[in-house]
Amino acid sequence: MTAQRRLSPFETNYFSPSAKFGSVPTSGMPLFIGSTVHGRLDIEILRRVLDELAAAHPLLRSRVVTDADGTMSFHRDDRYRPRFDITEGDEVEYVNLVNTQQDWRDGLFRAHLLRGDDRDQLVLVIHHGIADGRSAFALLAQLWRQYTAHAAGTPLPQPDSDQGLPEAIDNQLATVVSDIEIDALLDEVRSATATMSPESAPRALPKDGDGLGDDPLGRLALQRIELDAEETASFVGAARAQGISVNSLLTAAAMIAFRSRLEGDAGPLPLFCGHAVDLRSEANLPVGTILNCSSGAGTYALVAEDSNPIDVGSAVAAAMQAATDRLEAACFLLAGRRDLDEMTAAILAAAPTLAISNIGRLPAHSMPDDIRNIRVDVYAMSPGMPPKLTAFTVGGRLTIQVEYDTALYSRTQMGKITLALIEQIQRCAAVADE
């Protein structure tokens, strides 16, 4: 089976210095995912499960090798054992961890266990060039299934460890998306930009950060909004009652929250939201495949301070359907492989007002009886990124994270946006409860 292959143009964006994918700085970008639990985790079982995960997914045990001509390749290392660090710590140490620049020379997958008085926090650290949010959540679920089985003395059968490296998503999509479809998207983007007046150009959040990244609590920050099962059901019910997706309604609530911090009168202003889009279905890949399959699509809406989230959500839903129909996410990813003219490249690299990555609805993780889940922890940011929301529903409870770079955006401003977002979520839920 394939033990080595070249990085694709899309993957190279994550391993080249100063590289970007669209407006997102991607070079060396880490993806953190894990669980905080009440109880003590068994170190020996964790060590065994980490080894099993690396054995089951060839990219997790691969290294990037650069040839003399600069060509980069993945080399599968079947002897690789993920590094596993164990330290005392809590939320402060977690924030320090996600703000630490990662050294990927000794592997692209590792784990860190932070131990508190009555809680453990397990964090998987994965290079974003080999995994996205969907596959990371699938990996975490696999970890808990195998941990629980080992704790019960009934380990699960392991897949064949001689699997070949999965082909890059852009190489796979290049066989199913035509040049005509990519050209059509680029023509539409150029045409829309050419006819856009200054008044209709998407607004950006004021940059009021310290400009240095010297925040004592960490340059990269996050604020969590955690809904309970009843609040989640009300919010989901509000979306379903209107025939729109939960993602569309959440995007609307976020747009209105961001609109509250934009200067000008209370009337409508143009906002643009970038959406992370999983392309596995286009390539017929299983959800659990460890591979970065994430691209982007965008939705544009006019939003006033007093906009109704249901109305904005309907506009977002229509825009997302149009983006799906024209294969926007796949075409956007493949357009990055082209030698674009300066104007087109600048259009595709323009930062959105905000971005959102919605992992979707997932079942609760299986855990031994002596372990109780507190929360799922996920984070994927890099300096210079636009403000971003990450949303996921695990076990019927929706979590929304507001994530940002304090060098660009102050904690005060983002805290007010978080409060405004909570208000809009409650407003939506109240509609469902009427």
Image (cartoon, rainbow, N blue to C red):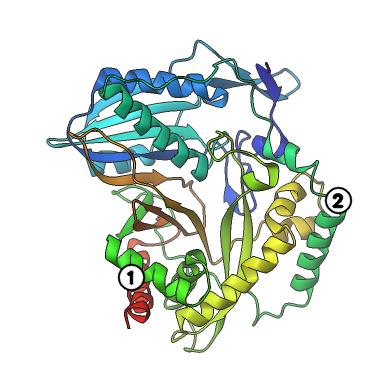
Residue at 31% across, 22% down: 150
Is there any visible trace of residue 383 in the rendered image? yes
Is 138 left or right of 335, judged from the image as shown? left
Is 72 left or right of 152, judged from the image as shown? right
Is there any visible trace of residue 202 in the rendered image? no
Which of 93 and 302 lies nearest the eye of the viewer?
A: 302
Q: Position of residue 16 (x, y in %)?
A: 63, 34
Above/below status of 366 relative to 2: below
Looking at this view, name the residue that lies furthest to the right: 180
Where the C terminus falls, by quadrant?
Answer: bottom left
Is 117 left or right of 298, judged from the image as shown? left
Q: What residue would you read off at disc 1?
A: 422
Residue at 26% across, 38% down: 93
Is 9 left or right of 426, judged from the image as shown? right
Looking at this view, name the residue that lies furthest to the left: 117
Q: Position of residue 308 (x, y in %)?
A: 46, 84
Where the N terminus falls, by quadrant?
Answer: top right
Looking at this view, name the residue that lies furthest to the top: 79
Q: Which amino acid does the dot numbered 1 rest on? A: Ile
Q: Position of residue 384 (x, y in %)?
A: 51, 52
Which of 209 and 325 lies nearest the eye of the viewer?
A: 325
Mark linked to residue 84: none
Which of 283 and 418 lies nearest the eye of the viewer?
A: 283
Q: Which amino acid does the dot numbered 2 rest on? A: Asp
Residue at 63% across, 44% down: 280
Mark 2 or 1, nearer chain start: 2
Secondary structure under tag 2 reads helix
Q: Residues within 10 Å of mark 2 (few under 14, many from 20)?
A: few
Q: Position of residue 330 (x, y in %)?
A: 71, 51
Mark linked to residue 179: 2
Residue at 54% across, 37% down: 131
